[in-house]
Image (cartoon, grey):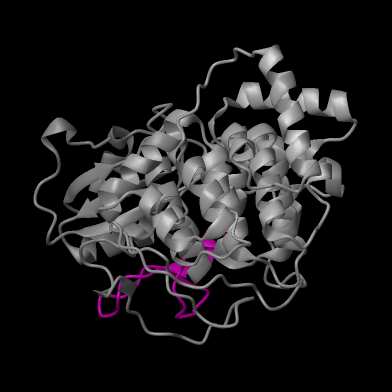
Amino acid sequence: MSHFGRSGPPDIRDTYSLLVLNITFRSTTADDLFPLFDKYGKVVDVFIPRDRRTGDSRGFAFVRYKYQDEAAKAVEKLDGRVVDGREIMVQFAKYGPNAEKIHKGRISEPVYKSRGRSRSRSPRPSMFCCDDTFGTHDSASPVRRSPSPRRSPSPQRSLSRGESPVAKNHKERSATPKSVSPRVIRGGSRSPSLGSEADRALLLWTLDPSERDACIANEATKRWTSSNQVLVEIACARSPKELLLVRDAYHARFRKSLEEDVAYHTTGDFRKLLVPLVSSYRYCGDDVDLTLAKKEAKILHEKISEKAYSDDDFIRILATRSKAQIGATLNQYKNQFGNDINKDLKSDPKDEFLSILRATVKCLVYPEKYFEKVIRLAINSRGTDEGALTRVVVTRAEVDMKVIKDDYHRRNSVPLDRAIAKDTTGDYEDLLLALVGHAET
């Protein structure tokens, strides 16, 4: 949604883009933001990305100025301002027309020694390089785990948890001088305002869900290992229409199909399972054939008993039946044979193909439980698996995060937001807490 309507913004090649975080998801409009920012200079455009399904704001906006000094003044005056009951965070967009230079799909920026809290071994390049029109270039980077398992609260933290998690410590921030690359400086540090994993989370969040999944899937295929369950998440936890949109986005962005990349990068039984999963277009209705469910429950049990886990019929059932039909089949499986199918698929806990099959079943039938477990393992592992934590929080924030939070609290006796706050730091913590709370907004 742009303040300038259908005609679109003027030429933006020589403009300076500000990122405005923590706006309301429903009430704040571009027309509301325009007079607020227009006080400090010539505003070229105001754009609020919208969710395609609901039409609601996605919680952030981009404001373009013609002149950098006017943009810097807006940052100085408006960062921390309360708008529609929320304390907004204003900073130079890191990926706009006049932001840091980009080389070979990565951001080229100086590495500063951070004076603040950090749990990272070394700076990590962002996975994607995006401008504020959401164009991206993929760049594979390894999964990083934070080295220290826990941290003690910093004595500098005086913010109560009742305040907005994205916009804190604003009194310590000041606008960046014109002579340096546009940044928001926190507490006198020259570190970028968003850490590397915070950058990745923010960039993923700015993409539409289908584009986001396409980028995540592309990274997963390039770095695929037999223990990588990301492709299963995308193929099985999304609706048939959502998966179709992901495949379309993959076509448009990478000039090839998701299916061909999955087939190229996987082998053996994994390829036999994953290619039909990502290619499937399941029936999405609630109709169930109980006779068929009883018959296919028997087939599944026979194949598991024979340890024929990659049998054509076994994979056909999981890859093509509707989620409602699979749910009915698995209920019949338990009624007839006394165990949940996933319990019978644990005959060899170290078998990674069986692990992929269990993830497939769980994503199809109990996606919230699956993602709760991913978050739990990411937080409880020796050093936080930030890649997994980011992926789940960003992709489920607008889907079922409330249920995931409830499941996490029930299983771990600790609220998810408290666990995240204990295990992360700085702007990365702020962003995750804001997204985790989105379901209640």
**Residue at the (65%, 13%) spot, across then down:** 289
Nearer to us in this view, 85 or 295:
295
Whole-percent x, y for residue 304 in the image: 77, 42
- Quarter of the picture containing the C terminus is top right
- Quarter of the picture containing the N terminus is top left
Q: Choose top left, top right, bottom left or bottom right for residue 33.
A: top left
The question of residue 336 being in magenta is answered with: no
Q: Magenta stretch mostly in which secondary structure?
A: loop
In this view of the protein, can residue 416 be seen by the observer? Answer: yes
Q: Choose top left, top right, bottom left or bottom right for residue 115.
A: bottom right
**Residue at the (68%, 39%) spot, across then down:** 361
Q: Residue furthest front?
A: 306
**Residue at the (46%, 49%) spot, across then down:** 88
**Residue at the (43%, 29%) spot, across then down:** 241
Instruction: Please report the bounds of the magenta region as a residue range.
Output: 168-193
Q: Is residue 268 above or below residue 438?
A: below
Q: Choose top left, top right, bottom left or bottom right for residue 60.
A: top left
Whole-percent x, y for residue 345 in the image: 78, 46
Lateral position of residue 246 relative to residue 124, left or right: left
Q: Is residue 316 above or below residue 307?
A: above
In this view of the protein, can residue 195 be seen by the observer? Answer: no
Whole-percent x, y for residue 168 in the image: 57, 58
Nearer to us in this view, 251 or 423:
251
Lateral position of residue 45 relative to residue 437, left or right: left
Whole-percent x, y for residue 236 in the image: 56, 39
Lateral position of residue 25 relative to residue 292, left or right: left
Q: Residue furthest right?
A: 338
Lateral position of residue 261 relative to residue 424, left or right: left
